[in-house]
Image: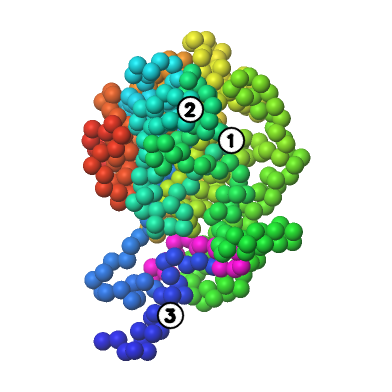
Amino acid sequence: MHSENQRTRESKNTHTISRRNVLRGMGAALALPWLESAATAANTVANATQAVDGPPVRMSFLFVPNGAHMDQWTPRTTGSNYELPRILKPLKNLRKDFSVLTGLTHDKGRANGDGAGDHARSASVFLTGSQPVKTNGADIRVGASVDQIAARAIGKNTKLPSLELAIDQGRNSGNCDSGYSCAYSFNISWAGPSTPMSKEVNPRQVFERLFQAGSKKEIASQLEKRNRRRKSILDFVLQDSRRLNGKLSKRDQVKVDEYFQSVREIERRIAQASDPRNQTEIVEPEGLKRTQRGRLPFEDHVRLMCDLQVLAFQADVTRISSFMLANAGSNRNYRNIGVSDGHHELSHHGRNPQKLEKIAKINTYHIEQLAYFLNRLKSIPEGDGTLLDHSMILYGSGISDGNAHNNENLPVILAGGGGGTIDTGRHIKVTNETPMCNLFLSMLERMGVDEPAFGDSTSRLDQLVL
């Protein structure tokens, strides 16, 4: 039997190195990554027969518009010995960490009697599996998205139930695609049938959401002070961080130091991104060009947003995120890779070889950004594996071939081990017309969310395990 003094000592130790350790300073709360020392402390006071939980499972959804050059996206053979097609070659060093899924379909992205508007439907159906009501008025209606179904169930366990990110701004009113509201084109995450989740495009605002604490007045005051003095958020939690001295294992000390370095580096990049001298030329869907000052180049912007997601997952600020690399029907040009034509314009390629080559370049470039995200997740040790091992990262589009505007055989990649519940490293070809929502239902199950059905699902996707 434990003595009263022993119980007190253990209680203090558990409080000091808790599973959800947070360093606090006025206006700031810096959550720490999963630590072995915390697990050991928890195990000390746990019943001898009680297992200590490992790292949580996370999931993220990345959306790209306008489909893909499917001939150069799709592997020729199935199983684990397939050859990576050209577009997926940036993932070469990660091939054991992801699977290519072909044959999945979003039937509700089809017109089904509603006529034109494929791009708006492709975004609105992407995570909802629901047919959007065709309207450009206030009576929008589609369905709750898979990320928000998960957030309702497990969001209470983290500071932020979910994180919604994007590169391009949007709006939720007006007609953006053949009679469909702009809300459908500019959002993939929906809290409910008529409520798109507000997405954040400003890296500084994302950073503050992850680490701010206290009253609005405190937060505003300390943010102004940090900016004026060019101080890091780490400087504001320095005093609280000293209580960790002597409490961490050597391995955890290294992990925390690397984590702090990541935070400082992201702050530096955010400050650089705020420089008004930064400017990029944007081509709007209508073909009009405009210059935006203070806007990051696309690749820098994407990678900074990816790093913020990694920080959010690493510190368990949230376990759920969505990220639109561009809005549906985006006509962005990619001059940095030699493509000056608009993406949407090129997607109507008519099998023109020159246009298809440019589409392949854009697709490959997007995959390079995915590779960056996955490599960052894989670089962070966690428990018995890495952050990527304990995540599910879904990348894809709501359209297959941009010229045909079809919604079957979608380009989909699923990366991460889902906490040891997914066998990766394969090309998995499912039966044609298999609902994409079958995959979502399986992902929800791995997040600990028990739903009998989702969207137009017919069953779970058994092929995720061998």
First along the sequence among labels 2 and 1: 2
> Which image quarter is the C terminus in?
top left
Between marks 3 and 2 in the image, the one whose residue lies nearer the viewer: 2
Q: Residue at x 62, y 52 (%)?
A: 266
Kind of residue indicated by mark 3: Lys
Q: Point out residue 354 in the picture as x, y percentages from the top left corner.
A: 56, 13
Q: Is residue 68 magenta?
A: no
For the point 42% across and 36% down, the residue is 194
Tag 1 residue: 169
Of circles 3 and 1, the one toward us is 1
Distance between the Cα atoms at labels 3 and 2?
57 Å
Can residue 428 be seen from the camera position used here? no
Q: Which residues are magenta?
A: 24-40
Q: Mark 1 belongs to which amino acid?
A: Gln
Mark 2 and mark 1 residues within 8 Å of each other at the beta carbon:
no
**Residue 26 forms part of the magenta stretch:** yes
181 versus 444 height, above or below:
above
Q: Position of residue 375 (x, y in %)?
A: 50, 45
Which of pointers 3 and 1 lies earlier in the amino acid sequence? 3
Q: Residues within 10 Å of mark 3 (few under 14, many from 20)?
A: few
Where residue 420 sits in the image (x, y, percent)? Answer: 32, 50
Q: Is residue 300 left or right of residue 402?
A: right
Displayed quadrant of residue 232? bottom right
Q: Nearer the viewer, residue 297 or 428?
A: 297
Q: Identify the residue position indicated by label 3 in the image.
A: 12
Quarter of the image containing the N terminus? Answer: bottom left
SS at mark 1? Answer: loop
Residue 185, x across and y down, in percent: 49, 28
View extreme (right): residue:
277
Amino acid type at image mark 2: Gly
Q: Which residue is mark 2?
A: 137
